[in-house]
Amino acid sequence: MMPSTLSNVADEELLEVILPKQAVRELMSEYGSVQHVLLQTSVQELARVRGIGPVKARQLQYLCELAKRLYKVHAKLPPVIRTPQDVFDRAVDMQHLLVEHFRVLYLNTKNGVIAEETISQGTISAALVDPREVFRRGVRLSAATVILLHNHPSGDPTPSPEDIALTQKLVEGGKVLDIRVIDHVIIGVGRYVSLKEKGLI
């Protein structure tokens, strides 16, 4: 019978779901712990144990690598955005793009970046931005706030009337979904303009 929770299941029992019980007993006798088995044994060592073989040993190696990567993801705090300069530093690659790219940073309640997404790529003079695309991802991520950013291929980050109008439209759209637009940063060559700093948000 499948247990209702796996948190209280012993390490050896979890390993027995993948390997024969006798193989698990032999591994525990030889190496002492599941952690040692998964993190420190080689594929060749595992494959020599009766009931495992090279295919199962390779599968265990892949599962272990996946577990380590997941641990790194959860152990690492997301980068925090404190100022428009932080946004510019993150998006510095945008300053030399030949057409406009519109990106959104999705933030948690601590202003940590939980996702970054390019919403649209436009012509040299304008980018088409669908507010539904901006906030659909935010709802799925349970984002608390978002920061809008796009580049001006001319190199001059001065906001146009269209930039300001789009920003206000997205600010209002975010209010409906309880996702606050906290800034719109326009990227130029070597410089930027923050609409929040300009008092336009």
Image (cartoon, rainbow, N blue to C red):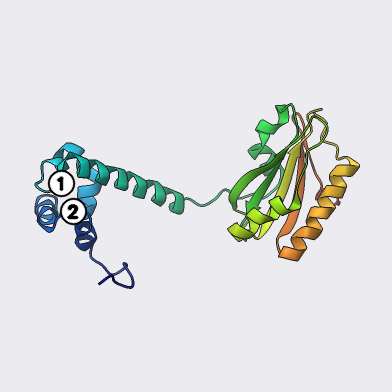
Q: Is residue 50 above or below residue 21?
A: above
Amino acid under disc 2: Leu
Amino acid under disc 1: Ile
Q: Residue furthest front?
A: 1
**Horizontally, is 3 left or right of 128 in the view?**
left
Inspect this view and state whether residue 198 appears.
no
Which sits in the foreground, 192 or 153?
A: 153
Crowding near the residue tagged with mark 1, few <14, some 14–19, many ≥20 C-alpha atoms within 10 Å: some
Q: CA distance from mark 1 to mark 2?
A: 7 Å
Which sits in the foreground, 58 or 181?
A: 58
Instruction: Name the quarter where the C terminus is drawn.
Output: bottom right
* Residue occupying the point 24% across, 52% down: 35
Q: Quadrant of residue 18?
A: bottom left
**Horizontally, is 132 left or right of 39 in the view?**
right
Question: Residue 98: image x %, image y %?
Answer: 74, 26
Q: Is residue 55 above or below residue 95?
A: below
Question: Residue 166: image x %, image y %?
Answer: 83, 48
Inspect this view and state whether residue 159 appears.
yes
Query: Do callouts 1 and 2 mark residues in contact (Cβ within 8 Å)?
Result: yes
Q: Disc 2 marks which residue?
A: 19
Crowding near the residue tagged with mark 2, few <14, some 14–19, many ≥20 C-alpha atoms within 10 Å: some
Question: Residue 78: image x %, image y %?
Answer: 54, 50
Disc nearer the start of the sequence (1/2): 2
**Which label was assigned to residue 52?**
1
* Residue occupying the point 71% across, 40% down: 120
